[in-house]
Image (cartoon, rainbow, N blue to C red):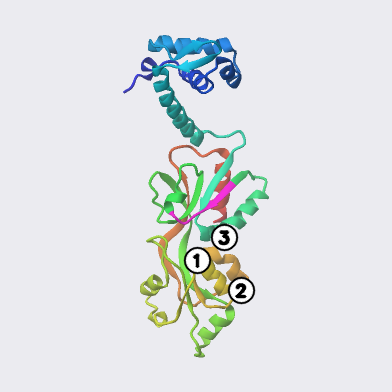
Amino acid sequence: MQAYRKSLPPLDTLVFFEAAMRHLNFTEAAEELFVTQAAVSKRIRQLEDWLGVDLFERSGRRLQLTEAGTYLAEKTGMTLDYLTQALSALKVPERPVVRIASVTALAAFWLQPKLKEFALSDEACLFNLATADDLGDLLKPEHDLVILHGDGRFPGWQSELLFPEVLTPVGMPEIIDALRSGGGGKQPALLNYPRLAPNWIDWTGWIQRTGRLDLKDWPVQSCASYNQSIGRALKGLGIALGALPLLREEISSGRLVPLDGATLKTGMGYYIAWPNMRPLGTEAERLKSALLEAG
């Protein structure tokens, strides 16, 4: 174990040295640090005495780094930058902004309306929302809360289930009514989209797991995303494979209708997660509680 107190000089001497190194002038460094020129000179001399070498060549008002000073300047700048980044990731600002990230589909159909309700409530706080579908982009340490799809096991993160994933075909009422009546006619297109993660289930996976082989030979129309497939279903351009908890508003309003007897519980779910590395702030806890209650 390192005995840093014995092996390092007082850390404020490094901060003073870094400022003096950039300005090559004790007075200008003092102005930046809001101290006197004498205080800067004293700290630099203290560091030089601790090291046993001169760091600056003093000639008039301007300074020049010695060979030892040049070597230490590079190392000190890198070290202080690294330390600043680490502390910034953990420090709670005076007016904390909760940084929340979400998978795109859930953000569009479920999260943003819930965030609006929260923003209008007495519990409101400042928050920033980022959306992504790549797990690496979501599980970044700078995020306070993350809402994502999976099985609840996210290394380095704690999580709670918002709601389980239930998939079912959905379409406009006229399309679903025609299928129910068995009136024949042209089969509607299955609106498909790319699987961006191994645990996403598309039409092929859904047909295999439900055994609905009667849909196997239906025409397929490719969409750019889940969101686009739902948008096309709302326009009557086919049937989308919808996640029921995400489509509560569309289904309750009658704009989309589920296909009878065709639901699949995937064993996955949508979770709210937060990093193990630091405790949640008060504002993030309030937002987390509000979203869990809404789920």
Q: Residue furthest left?
A: 1
Q: Earlier in the sequence, mark 2 or mark 1?
A: 1
- Separation of disc 3 and disc 2 at Cα? 19 Å
Q: In the rendered view of the protein, which quadrant contains the N terminus?
A: top left
Q: In the picture shown, does residue 48 fall above or below 166? A: above
Q: In the rendered view of the protein, which quadrant contains the C terminus?
A: bottom right
Q: Is residue 63 left or right of residue 125?
A: left
Identify the residue position indicated by label 2 in the image.
254
Which residue: 56% across, 9% down?
A: 38
Q: Earlier in the sequence, mark 3 or mark 1?
A: 3
Q: Amino acid at mark 3?
A: Ala
- Crowding around mark 2 (Cα neighbors within 10 Å: few <14, some 14 to 19, many 20+) is few
Q: Is residue 2 left or right of residue 288?
A: left
Identify the residue position indicated by label 3 in the image.
108
Q: In the picture shown, does residue 240 fall above or below 197? A: below
Residue numbers of the magenta segment? 128-134
Picture coordinates of residue 228, whole percent (x, y): 53, 68
Q: Amino acid at mark 1?
A: Tyr
Q: Nearer the viewer, mark 3 or mark 2?
A: 3
Which residue: 39% across, 11% down?
A: 53
Residue 214, image quadrant: bottom left
Q: Quick one: 141 or 157, which is closer to the camera?
A: 141
Picture coordinates of residue 112, whole percent (x, y): 59, 56
- Separation of disc 2 and disc 1 at Cα? 20 Å
Element class at badge 1: helix
Picture coordinates of residue 280, whole percent (x, y): 51, 39
Which residue: 58% across, 20% down?
A: 33
Element class at badge 3: helix
Q: Nearer the viewer, mark 2 or mark 1?
A: 1
